[in-house]
Amino acid sequence: MKILPTLAKKSAPKFWLFNVWLPLTFLGLATLLMPVEQVFQFDTDEGIELVRASLYAQGFEFYREIWSDHPPLFSILLAQWQSWFGDTVVSARWLALGFATLLVWLFAQTLRYFVSDAIALIGTLMLVNSINFLRLSVSVMIGLPALALAMLAVYATVRWGRTAKPAGGWLLLAAIAFATSLQIKVFTGFLAPILLGYIAWASWQRSPRRWPVAIAPLLWLMTGAVTFQAINVASGFDQAAQLIQFQFQGDLKAVFVNENSLWDVTVMYLQELDYVLLGILGAIASWRQGGWVRLPLLWLLLATALMLTHKPLWYHHYLVLSLPLTWLAAYGVKLAGERLWATGWRWWPRREEFRTPGQRLAAWGAIALLFALAVAPVKLAATQLQNRAFLQDSVAQRAVLAQILAYQADTDWLFTDVPMYSAAARINLPPEIAAISRKRVASGEISLTFLEQIIRQYQPEQFVLARFPEIREPLRPYLDAHYQELPVQANTHHYIRRELWATGTEREGFEPSIGSKPYNSLAGSRFQPLSHLSR
């Protein structure tokens, strides 16, 4: 059973629908449903990205001063964006929403090559309503922008493959977009073999004599490599080996002993059970049809295999799975729609409709589609409940922020494990701890010796510690001796330099000491790698 019609001829109404009304509708829905201005932080990574961009804008250098385990391109783009539209959290979230809109538009345009226009719209709506998509669409994080550019590479590659004559421009755009995606987050690199395989297959299908199979993949690789290196030079990103080594170091997996990748991936699929059921039908149909229709299936299988071997997994990693899963689910919707159309929109199949494999697929597809329709409002309600929790947390977080701002004029440096406090208060965080992540703490990279050096060099006027007791407890004797702890919400500890708290004057030079021991006497001490970290 074929599930791929030829792409309909272009028309003015369709052009406006897909290129104007669809992006605008998504923007409107996202701003209507998501409290972009009210939520303090949708994720702690938001503060990390904002702090990196702010420090870069002030002239600090990546990897020499600003610690980061990702390429710097997004931080550079964010810094430039905020120089144009304001150095605010809301401004940064609009940049993230712009990338999300690009992703939605590209997803819809790509689906049009695989299913009908109507099913493409339904599939796009399913993507928007998938778990955490709206949250990630307005979060200042790098995963979605990287996938938006990777989706541009997929779309351009499909467009090139579907062109009757070789159109080198689309192939070059695909390579440039993919290399740029890697410069935001390297995790999109797993798509390279899939795209290269498709390019080689499309070249062979077109004609080996006029367009040899090896030429197009080599052109794609060379263009991508040149683009990647050009961005390296322009951004000063020369620490690729060190970055990749930290991302994939073997002992990091051993540290997260409580993490179970198989269970995490299973939960990701179970929370989208309606898409899984439709996706299974679409996967079977695409496998039977073969060729380039299998592209989302290969994407999903490879991404799943990689995630099963990766630790730790976070909720935002699911976006790598949700894109191909929704794509396959759109295939399932088409199968179900064809069956419903043929039976006069009768949802429940009769016994005689299970005679052939094609009939069985279509019949089960109708049932799966009915389940998906029933679950859709539940997902939307879950998003709103999550937003309500964010708003409740924001009340307490803004109270802490107000307390930080009370001493803003007398504060040069803020030490915090919640970088959003630094970004919102516009008080610099020491660049070496621009990213205090769970991975850095777990790996032992954030050691007591390291923290001593930070305190000695920057002498922060304020400490705000809320996430990692593993950091606070070793510093507690020193903080109790030299700082005044202010009353704030539970699980958050706000310390002000005692002389600043007592007099409100500019800070005076002092030699830090931790507890009753001289500062240097703790040199060489170290946090043990933390194998008991909770999520």
Image (tube, rainbow, N blue to C red):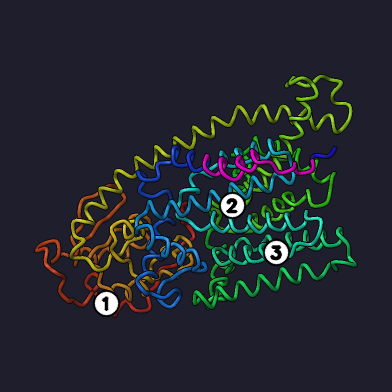
Which element type, helix, strand or loop, lies under badge 2?
loop
Residue pointed to by mark 3 = 169
State the residue at coordinates (59%, 67%).
248
Q: Earlier in the sequence, mark 2 or mark 1?
A: 2
Image position, residue 171 (x, y; %): 71, 63
Residue pointed to by mark 2 = 260
Disc 3 + disc 1, Cβ < 8 Å? no
Q: Give the quarter of the image for residue 279.
A: top right
Q: Callout 2, which amino acid?
A: Asn
Mark on residue 519? 1
Question: Mark 3 and mark 2: span between their CA atoms?
Answer: 44 Å
Image position, residue 166 (x, y; %): 79, 62
Question: Mark 2 and mark 1: span between their CA atoms?
Answer: 40 Å
Nearer to me, 243 or 90? 90
Region rendered in magenta: 5-25
520 horizontally vs 49: left or right: left
Nearer to me, 122 or 454? 122
Q: Callout 1, which amino acid?
A: Tyr
Q: Callout 3, which amino acid?
A: Gly
- Where 39 sits versus 447, above or below? above
Q: Earlier in the sequence, mark 3 or mark 2?
A: 3
State the residue at coordinates (68%, 35%).
118
User: Circle 3: is it few (<14), some (14-19), or many (20+) Cα within 10 Å?
Assistant: few
Which element type, helix, strand or loop, lies under badge 1?
helix
Nearer to me, 355 or 1? 1
User: Circle 2: is it few (<14), some (14-19), or many (20+) Cα within 10 Å?
Assistant: some
216 horizontally vs 405: left or right: right
> Which residue is farthest right?
209
Quadrant into which the N terminus falls: top right
